[in-house]
Image (cartoon, rainbow, N blue to C red):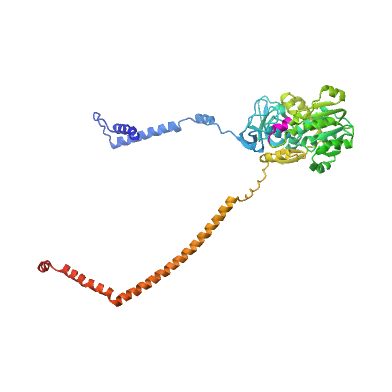
Amino acid sequence: MTETTEAPVVAQTAETKTPSPTNETAVVTPAENGHAEGGDAKTAAAGEEQTNGGATPDEKAKAEEKKEDPPKEMRAVVLTGFGGFKNVKILKKPEPSPQAGEVLIRVKACGLNFQDLMVRLGAIDSPPKTPTILGFECAGEIEAVGEEVEGFKVGDRVVALPEFRAWSELVAVPTKYVYHIPDEMTFQDAAAIVMNYLVAYILIFDLVSLREGKSILLHSVGGGVGQAIVQLARTVPNVTIFGVCSKSKHEALEATGLIDHLIDRTDYVNEVRKITTEGVDIVMDCLCGEECNRGYGLLKPMGKYILYGSSNVVTGETKSFFSVARSWWQVDKVSPIKLFDENKSLGGFNLRHLLYQQDGSEYVRSTVDKIFGLWKDGKVKPVVDSAWALEDVAEAMQKMHDRKNIGKLVLDPSMEPKPKPATPAKSKSKKQASEDKGGKKDKEDDKKAENGGGDEKKEGGDAADEAKTNGEEGGEAAHVNGDGGAAEHKEEPAAAAAATNGDATESEKKESS
């Protein structure tokens, strides 16, 4: 097929180069020929210039403007799918641009909350579509401002509460979720104070209206929200705090001197009853499940029970539908008539719903201003447990999952990740051991063979020497017996005769014949 296709092309080329016999052949002098060649060269150069560089400077500038630069990228903590820690990865994502009503924040610190663990599992209502950038809380500097933005400018130090996308180097956030921070406040403190103290303030002062002389039972007292509630409660005189947490945290929390009674979570109901038979005025529950019934049972008349979390749902690294169902089915159904008869109150609080679904942004903003005022007065100070690089977010999540943190866990995009430990050598399997043993044996056999070959070579050399000796002896014997010499002498007359006949003249040869 190739020859058939190419043949007409060759013929056409040859026909083009061959002048027609009917046409006159033009005679070109050398001068004219040089002029023609120069003209052709100029024409070719002009064509090339027109093709490559014929555009004017303005046209070149416009062409360069049309060339789009590749999008800039940033690091972000991305949830690739609901489940375990392996689905939380650090990936490169295109840098966002602020839309109308948004500001672009260069993130300096991010807050880690238990809600983030629940998002990873997909154990919240209306979970996001994956892949998605995680995080509800971050602090940093404004790098760009979108249209229709008032009250913010480039360079402002702010903290923000976006619905997701906070755990990245850059994030675009609507201004209704962005708050100026005091000049003296660090970015880590800003990321540690806003969400935790926002929840704590609303619980203490708006939902239960804490007053002097009241008592509080507080679950997870060592966590970020727990520490915020303790500090805010201490601004009210003569408040008794019963803090429930793991035994391992008691020593560190006792050193603060802010908690009246530290109780292990395994049997806290009986421990509280030993201290006060009447019970407590307020129960702050972030666990849900069976703890709802126990907490309600500890309330005094006129007591208030507040549910603000459901961390009991997170029982393992991956989502368990059984744990979710059990957490909710363990809660007794309390009718308004029962509350009426027992003079008790039930309440609940969900900041995410209030801020993003119920349009409580103005209420939240005014509360954040009050919290910053308390911080300036030195009445509250966020407790930062530890700071982590973005690459170590899974380890930070694991620490919160195990309830080992005291205070806030913070992510810092500028931090270097921890060096990864060297992978330990794996123990050899039986098959590998047998193969190694066989290989060792083969090496020994090869070594022996090599040594044996040398001996054989040596023996062969001795045999050759012996054969040489025998040959020499045989030669001597033959010479003595006269066999070898006789043969040699028999050949010599024949050779001489041949030489003589070969040297004879033509006449002598004829005569002899």
Magenta span:
318-325
Q: Picture coordinates of residue 21 (x, y %)?
A: 24, 30
Report if residue 172 lies within the magenta region. no
Q: Residue at x 79, y 43 (%)?
A: 248
Would residue 143 be visible to someone looking at this image?
no
Q: How many marks?
A: 0
Q: Residue at x 27, y 74 (%)?
A: 483
Position of the C terminus by quadrant = bottom left
Report which quarter residue 102 is drawn in: top right
Q: Picture coordinates of residue 274 (x, y %)?
A: 88, 37
Q: Nearer the viewer, residue 277 or 95?
A: 277
Q: Residue at x 53, y 58 (%)?
A: 443
Q: Nearer the viewer, residue 200 or 15?
A: 200
Q: Picture coordinates of residue 448 (x, y %)?
A: 51, 62
Would residue 434 be visible to someone looking at this image?
yes
Question: What secondary structure predominates along the stretch shown in magenta?
Answer: helix
Position of the N terminus by quadrant = top left
Residue 249 position (above or below residue 343): below
Q: Nearer the viewer, residue 303 or 179?
A: 303
Q: Nearer the viewer, residue 268 or 68?
A: 268
- On the rendered structure, is 292 left or right of 75? right
- On the rendered structure, is 100 left or right of 473? right
Q: Picture coordinates of residue 83 (x, y %)?
A: 66, 35
- On the rendered structure, is 449 left or right of 207? left
